[in-house]
Amino acid sequence: MSSYPEDDQLIRQLATGDEGAWRRLYEDMRSPFRLFFIRYGAMSPDDALGLYQEAMVVLHRNCTMGKIQAPLKSSIKTYLFGIGKVLLKKNGTDTRQWDDDIPELPVEPEVESRENQRASASLVQRLLDKVGEPCKRLLELAFIHGYAMNAIAEELELPSAGAARKRKFDCLKKMRGLLH
């Protein structure tokens, strides 16, 4: 008798190629997996997502080829996290000092959201530094301080709110160009 009857049933579904089951598993495991590897692997959210996608490919291959079958000796979650650790070891990351406890509670979306916000804020700051002082000042006034176009025009000594809008448009276009 298996200690993981629900996971045994899920493995059977996954082995048949049930797309709905794969989609649910992918969505359910993404956040806890990313949080674990961001926390213990000191990875960026994007790197953790890339590792997650690689781990899911390996899990898919193992399920469809019959390498993992019921009755399971561990939960699917533990197995998936183990795949992630093996992938990191293959890339030369030392995982011996990691806590082996895998979070069983669902990860609160705000934790992952804060990581994404930090990464986005860092990107925006780098872009603002690259666009130059006039654009940086205008965009900070508009988006960080919430100034109206009239106030921006007055602050930057522009002739009108229309001129401020045009400059804002040009600055955003310049930032978009830096992204590509």
Image: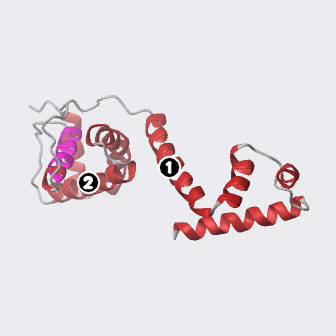
Q: Secondary structure at mark 2?
A: helix
Kind of residue at badge 2: Met
Query: In the image shown, does 19 or 39 lie closer to the viewer?
Result: 39
Query: In the image shown, does 173 or 57 lie closer to the viewer?
Result: 173
The quadrant where residue 134 appears: bottom right
The colour scheme used to paint the residues is secondary structure
Residue that extends furthest to the right in the rendered view of this protein: 159
Q: Is residue 177 above or below residue 118?
A: below
Residue at horizontal 13 percent and vertical 55 percent from the top: 90
For the stretch drawn in magenta, the main secondary structure is helix
Q: Could you say where residue 117 lies in the image, as x and y percent from the top left?
A: 51, 44
Task: Please indicate whether residue 164 sits to the left or right of residue 91 in the image.
Answer: right
Label 1: few (<14), some or many (≥20) within 10 Å?
A: few
Q: Which mark is residue 139?
A: none
Q: Which mark is residue 122?
A: 1
Closer to the observer: label 2 or label 1? 1
Magenta span contains residue 80: yes
Kind of residue at badge 1: Ser
Alpha-carbon span between mark 2 and mark 1: 28 Å
Which residues, given as a range, are shown in magenta?
76-87
Residue holding disc 2:
56
Residue at horizontal 84 percent and vertical 53 percent from the top: 149
